[in-house]
Image: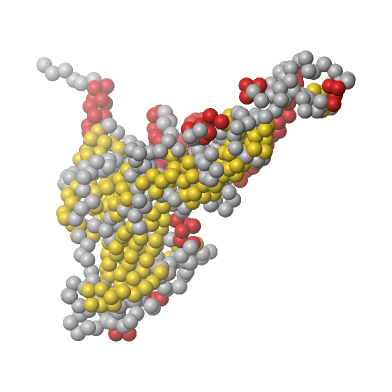
């Protein structure tokens, strides 16, 4: 005999059926646009989830072999109400670039929504066309040096070839001159900005040297624009122009206008590097039809890629005097004073001048030079000093002669690596004549008093301010001895405390100015205050029985706090965006769920869903509690 089910089991079964029905409404679709592109173009991958707005784990396309992700994902949420039912759609868009020509297939994607996996019904595909070389307009990428060494300058050179026009464009470049009809072909140079492994000027500084203009003459580069008050306009850059006669694919010779763009780079680390192809996209007026009539021609042109090999300075046959100089250099030396006693210090200046980079050159090791360490006591510098004009570097040494037999500072070797000939070269200074005199020693028996003949013996002692200083010619006696003085803790505190207090005051002042000057920080500071003002408006609307306005003010308070504390635009923020922000900030699951639930209730009220007026005060109170929790979480 069957037993009747208990009310509890019936409720559990109904909830399971409802949950299954809700889960079944989630669907995933995949689409790409456009479906046909060239290898120089990009395309969009759009993944759409219907029936869910939060808890979505979007797919990861980074492991794809035929394309690479260049941007995104950017997410968007839309809500529609049909037959008193709310339909939510979440869309995520990725920007991708193809890695090859041909048909690229993207298989069906799997997405996890609240822990459950959903799969799109089918995959998609697109056709990628190879760029066909056109005789009328093409690009070539080259370099001044295919093999370079660290710290060595070289140039990346882009040449743009445009065959002379026809008709009214004869003997002229085939670029549109009518402002209303467009601009010259736009250039995309991936290597214009900073490139790993190289040092170069910034794009802004480089392009300023090309004299940008707003006129309809010149190439737009990397979509750089003039930021006007009311509108933005593409900047055009006039490149160096010359003419050249070339043979086209039909075997005939034509006149070409050649435009050259050249940018300097300095290699930093050894290795193999590749500069990506440059791309041009636009319209020319040189299409040659059967009747040789003027016609606009849409084009996409791409240059070759450029391989650069950065070799390390060879270790074989490297001189001991090599200190990191790469280029071509010479060296000059001076010494002062030229007449000294044994053990008296002399100042030696070594000045290195040349065409290579000066910063990596270390001080020359004089102790490794022939004979110098034997006749001088040497104090070497830690670094050198680059001249204001940036053309030379000076090293200062202190030399003390060991004996009176020294007549000159010997020639000093300076080695550098010549990258043009790929050989080490040695430059030498000239010999510097000096005079070293031997001093007389005195002992304690000679230093007793200033009476008698002893005072007159000026060759043996020297009296300075009633003190007697013996003259030595033994190098070991030249080591300076300073009296040891002890500083008390009180003296140390008096010395250290004022600078410390001043530094702390300056840092506090600078921090305060920075905080007051940063709009995002000021916005975050006032976020809670503004949210509570919105809730005060919600309380007033509650007393007036205006349910829709209550939920509107609650949504403004919650979304405004999230936007202000995360420096995001509040306009257009959706409950899904709020859930994603809280998930990024690792907010507790209970808090995320509470905020999402309340925002969805506000969304229903916004679209006219009925709300109970008796619960408005409870909703405002719940919003206040959530604001307090969010304030602690989003600090």
Task: Determine the residue located farthest toward the left in the rendered image.
Answer: 1
Residue 293 lies left or right of residue 338; in this view the side is left
Task: Determine the residue located farthest toward the right in the rendered image.
Answer: 451
On screen, 453 above or below 357?
Answer: above
Residue 590 lies left or right of residue 245; in this view the side is right
On screen, 455 above or below 233?
Answer: above
Can the viewer see residue 283 in this picture?
no
Identity of the residue drawn at 53% across and 33% down:
372
On screen, 534 above or below 629?
Answer: below
Identity of the residue drawn at 56% across and 41% down:
395
- The percent coordinates of residue 512 (x first, y second) are 64, 39
- The percent coordinates of residue 623 (x first, y second) are 49, 35
Task: Determine the residue located farthest toward the top in the rendered image.
Answer: 445
Can the viewer see residue 481 in this picture?
yes
Quadrant containing the N terminus is top left
- The percent coordinates of residue 265 (x first, y second) are 41, 52
Identity of the residue drawn at 32% across and 50% down:
147
User: Which corner quadrant of the image does residue 585 belong to?
Assistant: top left
Identify the image's colour scheme: rainbow, by chain, secondary structure or one colour: secondary structure
In the foreground, 539 or 244: 244
Identity of the residue drawn at 49% across and 62% down:
208
In the foreground, 88 or 250: 250
Count of residue discs: 0
In the foreground, 175 or 336: 336
- The percent coordinates of residue 631 (x first, y second) are 52, 33
Residue 354 lies left or right of residue 609; in this view the side is right
């Amino acid at each position: 005999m069957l037993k009747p089910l208990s009310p509890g089991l019936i409720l559990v079964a109904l909830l399971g059926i409802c949950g299954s029905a809700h889960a079944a409404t989630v669907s995933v679709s995949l689409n790409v646009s456009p479906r046909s592109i060239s290898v120089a173009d990009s395309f969009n991958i759009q993944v759409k989830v219907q029936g869910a707005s939060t808890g979505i784990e979007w797919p990861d396309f980074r492991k794809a072999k035929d394309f690479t992700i260049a941007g995104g994902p950017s997410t968007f949420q839309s809500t529609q109400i049909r037959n008193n039912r709310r339909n939510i759609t979440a869309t995520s868009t990725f920007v991708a670039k193809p890695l090859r020509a041909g048909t690229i297939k993207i298989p069906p994607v799997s997405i996890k929504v609240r822990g459950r996996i959903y799969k799109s019904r089918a995959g998609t595909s697109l056709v990628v066309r190879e760029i066909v070389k056109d005789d009328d307009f093409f690009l070539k990428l080259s370099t001044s040096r295919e093999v370079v060494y660290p710290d060595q300058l070289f140039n990346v050179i882009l040449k743009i070839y445009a065959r002379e026009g026809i008709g009214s464009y004869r003997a002229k470049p085939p670029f549109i001159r009518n402002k209303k009809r467009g601009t010259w072909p736009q250039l995309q140079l991936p290597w214009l900005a900073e490139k790993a492994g190289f040092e170069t000027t910034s794009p802004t500084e480089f392009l300023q040297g090309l004299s940008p203009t707003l006129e309809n003459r010149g190439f737009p580069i990397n979509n750089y624009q003039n930021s006007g008050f009311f509108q933005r306009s593409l900047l055009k850059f006039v490149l160096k122009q010359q003419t050249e006669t070339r043979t086209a694919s039909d075997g005939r010779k034509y006149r070409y206008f050649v435009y050259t763009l050249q940018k300097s780079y300095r290699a930093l680390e050894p290795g193999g590097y590749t500069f990506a192809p440059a791309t041009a996209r636009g319209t020319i007026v040189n299409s040659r039809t059967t009747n040789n009539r003027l016609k606009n021609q849409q084009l996409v042109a791409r240059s070759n890629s450029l391989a650069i090999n950065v070799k390390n300075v060879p270790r074989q046959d490297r001189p001991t005097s090599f200190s990191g100089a790469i280029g071509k250099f010479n060296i000059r030396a001076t010494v002062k004073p030229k007449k000294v006693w044994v053990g008296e210090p002399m100042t030696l200046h070594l000045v290195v001048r040349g065409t290579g980079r000066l910063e990596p050159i270390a001080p020359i090791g004089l102790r490794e030079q022939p004979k110098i360490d034997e006749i001088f006591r040497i104090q070497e510098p830690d670094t050198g000093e680059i001249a204001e004009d940036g053309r030379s570097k000076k090293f200062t040494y202190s030399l003390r002669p060991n004996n009176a037999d020294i007549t000159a500072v010997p020639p000093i070797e300076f080695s550098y690596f010549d990258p043009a000939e790929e050989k080490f070269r040695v430059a030498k200074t000239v010999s510097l004549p000096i005079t070293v005199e031997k001093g007389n020693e005195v002992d304690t028996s000679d230093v007793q008093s200033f009476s008698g003949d002893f005072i007159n013996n000026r060759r043996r002692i020297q009296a300075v301010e009633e003190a007697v200083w013996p003259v030595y010619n033994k190098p070991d006696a030249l080591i300076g001895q300073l009296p040891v003085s002890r500083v008390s803790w009180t003296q140390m505190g008096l010395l250290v405390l004022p600078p410390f207090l001043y530094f702390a005051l300056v840092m506090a002042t600078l921090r305060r100015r920075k905080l007051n000057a940063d709009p995002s920080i000021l916005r975050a500071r006032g976020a809670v205050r503004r949210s509570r003002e919105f809730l005060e408006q919600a309380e007033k609307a509650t007393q007036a029985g205006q349910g829709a306005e209550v939920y509107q003010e609650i949504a403004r308070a919650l979304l405004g706090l999230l936007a202000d504390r995360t420096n995001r635009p509040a306009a257009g923020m959706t409950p899904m965006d709020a859930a994603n922000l809280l998930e990024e900030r690792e907010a507790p699951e209970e808090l995320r769920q509470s905020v999402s639930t309340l925002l969805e209730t506000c969304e229903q009220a916004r679209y006219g869903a009925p709300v109970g007026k008796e619960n408005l005060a409870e909703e405002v109170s719940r919003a206040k509690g959530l604001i307090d929790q969010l304030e602690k979480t989003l600090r």
